[in-house]
């Protein structure tokens, strides 16, 4: 699974308003010919990214190349079960990537369009965002 090697701050503030705006970066196809783009806001965890990656690699079977365009760098904390109120913020539990509408999630190159479409749509079922298949113009 993806997670940062080193972080400047162990715990982050929760955003006041998460569902705001569209992607201004990672919003164009840079490496491959085919990609999936998010259509909704969400936090995508490192486990979900790994599950989608596995679906793609099993489907394309060593033909073609894949790029993961998002990286989970935001820590999400969790307090222990049956903890009383107070006693501070919990320990980091997992990492997520913040995804806005228009963010490119995965890119593919070197396979046919039909295979790429099927692989990317199948991987989209593993993600908490609605996705759309796009190709480079």
Image (cartoon, rainbow, N blue to C red):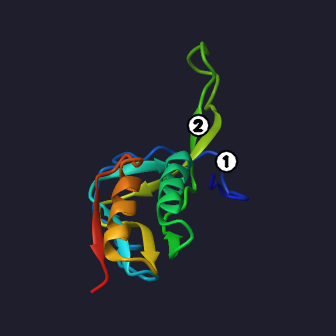
Front in this rendered view, residue 45 or 114: 114
Give me the residue at 51% from left, 71% from top.
66
Is 30 situated above or below 9? below
Direction from residue 131 to residue 74 in the image, left or right: right
Picture coordinates of residue 121 (x, y %)? 33, 58
| Lower sequence index among marks 2 and 1 | 1
Is 11 situated above or below 63? above
Picture coordinates of residue 134 (x, y %)? 28, 72
Q: Residues within 10 Å of mark 2 (few under 14, many from 20)?
A: some
Q: Are marks 2 and 1 in contact (CB under 8 Å)?
A: no
Direction from residue 23 to residue 110 in the image, left or right: right
Give me the residue at 54% from left, 54% from top.
54
Q: Residues within 10 Å of mark 1 (few under 14, many from 20)?
A: few
Q: Quadrant of residue 108?
A: bottom left
Give me the residue at 52% from left, 74% from top.
63
Give me the residue at 48% from left, 66% from top.
60
Question: Mark 1 sits on what residue?
Answer: 10
Q: Quadrant of the C terminus?
A: bottom left
Direction from residue 117 to residue 10 in the image, left or right: right
Picture coordinates of residue 103 (x, y %)? 36, 66
Q: Quadrant of residue 24?
A: bottom left
Picture coordinates of residue 131 (x, y %)? 30, 58
Instruction: Report, in whole angstroms, how far the alpha carbon at label 2 lies from the one at label 1.
Output: 9 Å
Q: Secondary structure at mark 1?
A: loop
């Amino acid at each position: 699974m993806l997670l940062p090697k080193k972080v400047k701050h162990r715990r982050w503030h929760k955003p006041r308003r998460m569902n705001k705006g569209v992607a201004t970066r990672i919003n164009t196809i840079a490496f491959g010919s085919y990609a999936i783009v998010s259509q909704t806001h969400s936090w995508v965890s490192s486990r979900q990214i790994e599950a989608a990656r596995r679906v793609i690699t099993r489907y394309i079977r060593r033909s073609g190349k894949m790029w993961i365009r998002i990286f989970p760098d935001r820590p999400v904390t969790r307090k222990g079960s049956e903890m009383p109120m107070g006693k501070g913020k919990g320990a980091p539990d997992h990492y997520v990537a913040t995804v806005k509408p228009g963010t490119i999630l995965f890119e593919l190159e070197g396979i046919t369009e039909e295979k790429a479409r099927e692989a990317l749509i199948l991987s989209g079922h593993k993600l908490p965002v609605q996705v759309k298949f796009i190709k480079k113009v």
